[in-house]
Amino acid sequence: MSRRSGDMVGVWAEMQRQQQRQTVAESRRRWEADQQTQAYQMRATQGHREFRAAEARRRTEELDARVAVLQSLLASGCEAPAFRTASLLRPETVEPFAPGALAVPLTLPDPAHYQATGGWHTGQAQAEARARFEHDWYAAQEAENQRQRQLAAYQREYQRWADARLAETRQYNAGVRELTDGVRRRDPETVVQFFTAALYASTAWPEDFPRRVAAAYDTAASQLVLDWELPGYDAVPEAKSVRYMYNLDQDKEVARPVTQRRALYRDLLAQCVLLVLHELYAADESGVLESVVLNGLVDGHDPTTGRPERMCLATVRADRTTFRELRLAQVDAASCLTDALHGQLSGRPDQLTAVRPGRRPEEVGNRVVAHGGDTEPDLLGMDPLAFEDLVAELFRAMGMEAVTTRRSGDGGVDVDALDPTPIRGGKIVVQVKRYRNTVPPSAVRDLFGTVQDRGANKGVLVTTSRFGPGSHTFANGKPLELISGPELVDLLHRHGLRGRLGDGTPSRTVQPTPTVPDLRLPEDYNILGMAWTGSVALDVCALVCRGNKVLGDEHFVFYNNPSTPDGSVRTLTPTAPDKAAVCVAFDGLPPEADRFVLVAAVDPEVNADADLSGFTDARIRLLDPALTELGELAVSDGRPGETALVLGSFRRRAGDDWDFVLGGRGYTGGLEELVRDFGIEVD
């Protein structure tokens, strides 16, 4: 029987892997942003040919760096910290009570402040002064009593939360100790769960390497038997370098010699096998492994039948005593595997020439535990009630109290949640939409009404699909949070839960669109840099229109949709003196588009009460790809009471020329009212 571990250590391993994915993804995003920013700056200072040649050199350096990582996999992996059960333990502490301003007693009125110079006077002046004092004193005393009541209520709420959190932590740590005892007793399933989780959550492997493992433990022989998925041949870059061809004005990839690529791949497989063995024995604090049988597999096709099959490219049986005598940092991986450990390694792994596997996990006779398989539940095909239960479980995993509501009379609420965190916590109403199509803005508006009716602190709308600009525009500045399908999968994985969207492949972390120019843009794109005086924070957006209507939601470029589908319009990181920038390739706009409109709106999350009266001396700079200024376009100033403004529009003329027409129309209802005027559904 094969299953994926769903117990505590399995959940922990899934959480660790998701944290690694987040860390690697963030590092990758920062690196890509730096690279693209440098390229953006290079274009401003270099000629076209010099820039393309520099880009070719940079891509070659990336290929060299990738190969260096593959060649040093074993050495660097051996330097990673060994897995220890102590890493599973959580500190048995909770955040201290922090009531904020409620902890400060109110100051009662001082009678001396109500007396005229020389003391209390007789007559009417004395009576009026005493009356004012008594009125203010009783009001202050009532306010102080109210503060004390609120403080006591917060204290009780915090104590309930702290007691529950501490009890949960202690129960979890008791489970860790039980796990440790199970490994020491050599309970087969516990042993396998422990070691497979150690491999699955290891930081020694490149993020894009597979982590699929299936294993069983032979108690009598103290032997762990496992199948481990090896990286495919495409892990070794096919290209060796990139050259810029001046005469053709194009890049050419220089292929890596076949013999070199094959040798690199064979060495990589040997390193992978040795690194798995190293991590297993390094994690064996209790000495329960006398030997390990490891089969390294890749997905392929049987050459005789053409059917999909897992091909074994390496196998080894390594005894603990023999393996610990090795000095892995100095070995030749292939020779060590085949000669020192007497294992087998495919002579032509690039052609999937298989070797005979050793003992397999299913032959051991105990339950097989697996990590990293493709059994993620499909959220789109999940039963609606089960989907609501999963969302409630996610909120509980995030440290909140959450229950699903009754199917009738729930007021449109699917999950009631309570964030017990003092000050920033409170009641949350959650609606769940298992949609395939874009959630309509009316659903977001209904949620806002529910939040107001129920007196909740926040409303959360969770869906398996996505939200359009109208939904984001309506939610902006309100106590609403919209969680799209990919974001939901990301949250599930981050908190040790599972789910995918449709196609059978595990979902990956959402990758934001870069906010710097795409280097593959046509050479004739323009940059529109916008500057203004005043400190008001603005969102600058663009609409690709036919007449007075936007072509579609995806052609509204703003903070939640930073690019059109064809990439002809996208937001950019501005360069001084600009405060905002948009890139547009006019020749790349859809043929049916005849207007390109720029608008600005007050950001309600930064300046909730601001208007456009501080939007003055505004201008649009028209720049070419080298940041050379081609012209400057004047823009109307903002007016008091207005919170959104049409800056101007470029209109297609005969011969596909584009002329700029000054805007100036303002809106008091912010971006929501403006985009509705251009045909985007908001309510």
Image (cartoon, helix red, strand yellow):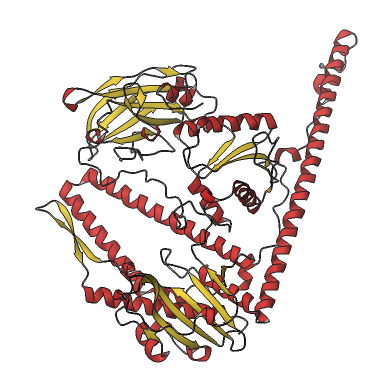
548 and 585: which one is in front? Answer: 548
Residue extending farthest to the front is: 305
Residue extending farthest to the right is: 122
Name the residue: 61% across, 77% down.
191
The image shows residue 535 at horizontal and vertical percentages of 45, 28
Considering only vertical position in the picture, is 330 above or below 84? below
Quarter where residue 242 is shown: bottom left
Name the residue: 32% across, 52% down.
35
Name the residue: 75% across, 54% down.
164
Considering only vertical position in the picture, is 648 above or below 389? above
Residue extending farthest to the left is: 247
143 and 270: which one is in front? Answer: 270
Quadrant of the drawing holding the N terminus: bottom right
Quarter where residue 25 is shown: bottom left
Residue extending farthest to the top is: 124
230 and 480: which one is in front? Answer: 230
Q: How many marks?
A: 0
> On the rendered structure, is 363 left or right of 75?
right
Query: Is residue 477 in sight in this rendering?
Result: no
The image shows residue 10 at horizontal and vertical percentages of 59, 66
Name the residue: 50% across, 46% down.
485
The image shows residue 462 at horizontal and vertical percentages of 56, 42
The image shows residue 34 at horizontal and vertical percentages of 35, 51
197 and 322: which one is in front? Answer: 197
Query: Is residue 139 in sight in this rendering?
Result: yes
